Image (tube, rainbow, N blue to C red):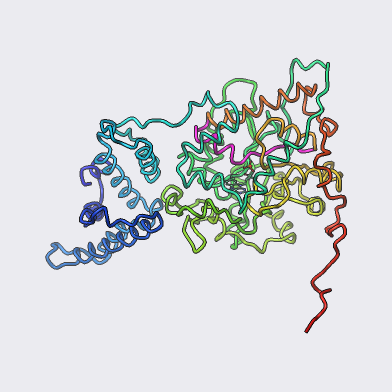
Amino acid sequence: MTRWLALREPEASPVLQLACRAQHFRRWEIPRSSYPMTRPGYLTWRAKLKSQAAKQVAELLADASIQPPLSQEEIDRVAALVRKEDLKTDSDTQVLEDVACLVFLDEQFDDFEKRPDIDEEKMVGILRKTWGKMSPSETTITPPHNLPSQKPPLHTLLSTHDFAHAASLTFPPKTHAFVTSAATDLVTHRSNSHTYSLITLRPRILRDVSSVSIHTTILGEPVSSPIFAAATSLGITVHPEGEKEIGRACKKLGVGMTVSTSASFSVGEIADAVRDCEVEGDAVQKEIPLWFQLYVGKDRSKSEGLLKQAVEAGVKAVFLTVDAPVPGKREADERISASEAGAVVGVVPMTGEKAENDKSGGGLGKITDKFLDASINWGDIPWLRTCLPESVKLVLKGVQTAADAVKAMEAGVEGIVVSNHGGRSLDTATPTVLVLLELQRCCPEVFDRIEVLIDGGVMRGTDVFKALCLGVSGVGIGRGILYGLGYGEEGVRRYVEILNDELETTMKMCEITSLHQVHPGLLNTRAVDHLVPETVDEEHPYAKWRPSMRKKTV
Ligand SMILES: Cc1cc2nc3c(=O)[nH]c(=O)nc-3n(C[C@H](O)[C@H](O)[C@H](O)COP(=O)(O)O)c2cc1C
């Protein structure tokens, strides 16, 4: 331990050196057979063990024989380090974790390639997990062995489904659960995608489609594709550069990006990464629109501060998320302890929250819950307006009915995103493309007065095309961008380029050359028309019952 500490942190304080020596205190005395066999059991047991070790170390250090004597403050600090409190937010604790991981890699994996009996898959899993616990700078240290790569080479990925598959092979289990999970039975998550496939295309023939353009504008900003990166949180769970890397990819693609309130970097840091990213060639946009996704916090002054930061960072619009006053129940994410990602996630810079387990599990999605103000309502829109200069547009993200689309329009926002959070909020909520049809049927004026965007379940260029035909100006991608991020900036670019290519092919097959020519007549929606409400009315079409009508029986 001390050898690695000296390499890793030559100037380590005496307290850190002591903690380093105490790191494995008494651990080797425990026979392997007494480890609890289940994962939750093991994690609780290990936490207890750390606590016990910290206590014993503190007792030892307080002993009169230790000369010169240590102050109580120093003793407490060593114990806290051994307990690994505030991992990731405390640089000394992270150093200790890095050192422990390096020792582990050095001792346990030195000759693992030479051992014929090895269960390679298991070992690779352990290696990946160990790296997940280390700080980004340490993970760049080349390990003394070649990690067999399960990652399919990027050029072999030909569809968005291939990316989802690659993510399932390579993301650490907690990251995979966090990214892919959706609310309860995943009905909305699946039907977001499935409903697109029920809408069929009506290709036309014999028009010159030798060249097509997918350049367009979203919220008044020119972009080279209608596809944009939807707001996603905790990008660092996928890639050490998280949202900064997504931003670089978007800049190179010339597409818009939404920065989440729960991003792993501040909006200013992400904007700087985008600004500093060099773009070659003339064909792409030199500037891309950055939008800021806002979760309103319980402390409104904090939200005002965030908006100020976002405006200073140059965002062109604020997307207020309205479909998640509380986080959805995502069981896959809940099932895996938050501590599996806690070290990587650390404290979310813009909300100040960190990942923790509670009585319902370890869902990372709940990181926003502690911060979120569920009392946010229509009356808050004027307040939000006062926080923004006139040049910054306001968009409601998560509109799911015609009635609310009309209300949004009347409230004076510049746009809405038809979204159900990718099925992550409320299961069995309506698939987004159906909501789009509802808006077209019940309140078509919305499309003339404000901009309508959409996200959820978009996996093919044909899906993008169908949404465009139904009146949207932009199509957001959530999970897919994170699948691409598994390969860094290049992966995000390839993901979007695949969709762009498919969109261009669809346009050519439908005999249009520009996005100005899309219209609903290119679609046959009959298979789903019966599912689309007929009025903007908030009432059910025939069931008028109310609890107050129930006869009093006693
Ligand atoms: C891992 C992950 C994190 C997300 N974080 C946020 C967030 O912080 N704020 C937000 O408004 N939406 C968030 N979303 C929802 C996306 O913005 C978007 O609505 C959704 O992912 C679109 O569906 P898709 O994943 O099927 O493309 C998140 C989605 C995922 C998958």
Q: Position of residue 124 (x, y in %)?
A: 37, 37
**Is 32 left, or right, of 156 in this rendering?**
left
**Is 493 left, or right, of 204 in this rendering?**
left
Quadrant for residue 219, please give it: top right
Quadrant for residue 8, please give it: top left
**Is 260 left, or right, of 462 in this rendering?**
left
Vertical position of residue 71 compared to residue 6: above or below: below
Residue sitting at x 71%, y 37%: 474
Of 506 and 490, the residue lying toward us: 506
Q: Is residue 377 magenta?
A: no
Q: Position of residue 232 (x, y in %)?
A: 58, 45
Of 172 and 545, the residue lying toward us: 545
Quadrant for residue 470, please give it: top right
Vertical position of residue 540 compared to residue 187: above or below: below
Of 148 and 358, the residue lying toward us: 148
Q: Say which quadrant the C terminus sits in.
A: bottom right
**Is 31 left, or right, of 509 in this rendering?**
left
Residue sitting at x 71%, y 31%: 222
Segment tinted magenta in the rendering: 471-489
Q: Is residue 137 visible?
A: no
Q: Position of residue 517 (x, y in %)?
A: 82, 27
Q: Is residue 479 magenta?
A: yes
The number of discs equals 0
Extreme-bottom residue of the structure: 554
Q: Is residue 435 visible?
A: yes
Q: Position of residue 385 (x, y in %)?
A: 72, 53
Of 531 and 134, the residue lying toward us: 531
